[in-house]
Image (cartoon, coloured by chain):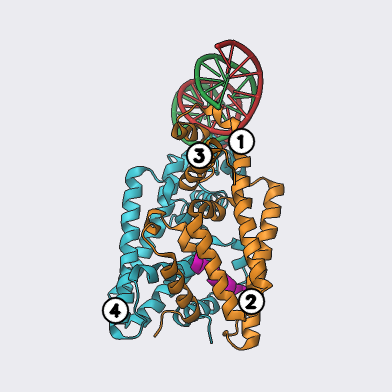
Chain colours: A orange, B cyan, C green, D red
DNA sequence: GTCTATATTCAGATAGAC
DNA sequence: GTCTATCTGAATATAGAC
C-alpha cells in the first residue's frame, strides 16, 4: 500500500493495539509508548483517532465488497458460491486478523454519518449472502428455510475466526480450516 | 432476585445501557440521565462501575455453569446433550439478551484477578462442550474431527443471537429458533 | 520529525448539606 | 435518597520551539 516504512510501522502498530484493546480503550498515549515516541508525534501520521478507525474499517469493508461482487458475477452454482464466500472470509481473516477483529467489534464507534454508510454496505453484503442461499434452495441443493436465519448462521460460523484470540490462529493451516468450516456449514456435525 | 423495586430498576437500566454502548463507552453520567437522577445517586446502588460489570458477568457465567453441569450429569446420549446445550443458550439469550451481550463483549474489562477467574470458568465450560463432541464421536453419532474446532463452530453458531441487534429478536419465537439452529448445527445447510 | 507545554473536555468518584 | 460542588486523573488534540 504505502511505501513509507515509518507510516507503515505506525499503521501496523495502531491496528494491533486497537484490536487488542478495542477502540474506546485504546489511547493515543499508549500507542505512542508502543511506538517509542511522544503522543504528539502520532498526529504526523493521522489527523485523529476517528480517522484511524475509519481507514481500517472501510479498507476491510471494501475488500469484502469486492470479493462478494466477483462471486456474485460468477457462473458458479449456489454451493460453489457459498464455498467461495467461505474461502473469501478465511483469506481475509488470515491476511488481516487484527483488522477483521476491529471490523466486527468497533464499527459502532464511527461517527453518525460514516456509520450509516458502513451499515448500508454491510446490509448489502448480507443481502448477497441471502441471494446465494435463495439460489441454492431454488436449485434444490440447499434446505429451504428463512434466508436471514441462514445468513446469520453462516456468517456466525465464520466469525469465531476473528473474535477468538489471535495467538490461537498462529499454528493453524488456512487450507485445513477452510476444508473443515466448509464441511461444518454444509453438513453439520452429525454423521 | 432483589425485591427492592428501586434497585431493580437501577440494575435493569444499567444493564441495558451497558449493552448498548459497551462498558468503556457507557458513562455514569449518561446512566444517571437515563435514570432521571444525579450521577452521585448511582453510588447508592453500586460501589463502582467495575462492580456493576462484575455482577452482570458472573451472574451469567454461573447460569451457564449450572446449566452445563446438569447436562453433563444427565444420562442423555451425545446428540441429546448437544441439543440440551443449544436449548440452554436459547433460553439464557431470550431471558437476558442484554446480559448475554455484555457477557460476550465486555469480559476483557474486568480487572486482572477477576478476569483470570472468569476465563478459567469459560475454559471449563468449553471443555465440557468438547467432551460432548468427543462422546458423540465415540458413539459414532458425530463426524470425527478436531474437538476444539467443533466447539468453536457450535458456540459461534449460537453467538449471533446475542451479538446481533436486539430489536431483531423481538418478533422471534424461541421454540422456532431452537428448532432451526439445532437443525443447522446437526445437519448443515446442504440438502 | 521530534520534543515540551498546554488547552480543553470529560471521566469516575466523594464530601457534605438538606 | 436527593442534590450541589468538587477532587483527581486522564483523554484528545494543538502550538510552537528545536
Mark 4 to mark 3: distance in Å?
48 Å
Identify the residue at horizontal 67%, vertical 63% (top origin).
Answer: A123
Local crowd at mark 1 within 10 Å, few (<14), some, or many (≥20)?
A: some
Res B126 quadrant in image: bottom left
**Residue matched to label 2:** A132
**Residue matched to label 3:** A9
Mark 3 to mark 2: distance in Å?
39 Å
Local crowd at mark 4 within 10 Å, few (<14), some, or many (≥20)?
A: some
Q: Are marks 1 and 4 on the same chain?
A: no
Eye-nearest disc, 4 or 3: 3
Eye-nearest disc, 3 or 2: 3
Q: Are marks 3 and 2 on the same chain?
A: yes
Q: Are marks 4 and 3 on the same chain?
A: no
Identify the residue at horizontal 67%, vertical 57% (top origin).
Answer: A119
Q: Are marks 4 and 2 on the same chain?
A: no
Q: Are marks 1 and 3 on the same chain?
A: yes
Instruction: Indicate left or right for A172 with A11 as reference.
Output: left
What residue span does the magenta drawing correspond to?
A147-158
Considering the numbered disc 2 on the image, is that residue within a helix, a strand or a loop?
Answer: helix
Q: Locate the N terminus of chain B and report the quarter of the image it occupies.
A: bottom left
Q: Could you tell me residue B110's position as x and y percent?
A: 40, 46
Amino acid at each position: 500500500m504505502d511505501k513509507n516504512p515509518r507510516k507503515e510501522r505506525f499503521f501496523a502498530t495502531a491496528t494491533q493495539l486497537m484490536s487488542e484493546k478495542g477502540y474506546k480503550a485504546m489511547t493515543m498515549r499508549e500507542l505512542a509508548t508502543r511506538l517509542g515516541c511522544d503522543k504528539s508525534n502520532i498526529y504526523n501520521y493521522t489527523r485523529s483517532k476517528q480517522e484511524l478507525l475509519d481507514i481500517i474499517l472501510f479498507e476491510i469493508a471494501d475488500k469484502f465488497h469486492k470479493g462478494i461482487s466477483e462471486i456474485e458475477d460468477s457462473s458458479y452454482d449456489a454451493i460453489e458460491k457459498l464455498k467461495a464466500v467461505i474461502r473469501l472470509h478465511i483469506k481475509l481473516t488470515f491476511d488481516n486478523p487484527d483488522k477483521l477483529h476491529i471490523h466486527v467489534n468497533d464499527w459502532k464507534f464511527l461517527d453518525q454519518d460514516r456509520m450509516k454508510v458502513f451499515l448500508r454496505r454491510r446490509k448489502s453484503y448480507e443481502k448477497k449472502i441471502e441471494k446465494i442461499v435463495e439460489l441454492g434452495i431454488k436449485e434444490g441443493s440447499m434446505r429451504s428455510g428463512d434466508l436471514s436465519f441462514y445468513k446469520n448462521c453462516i456468517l456466525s460460523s465464520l466469525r469465531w475466526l476473528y473474535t477468538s484470540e489471535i495467538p490461537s490462529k498462529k499454528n493453524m493451516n488456512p487450507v485445513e480450516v477452510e476444508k473443515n468450516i466448509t464441511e461444518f456449514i454444509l453438513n453439520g456435525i452429525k454423521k
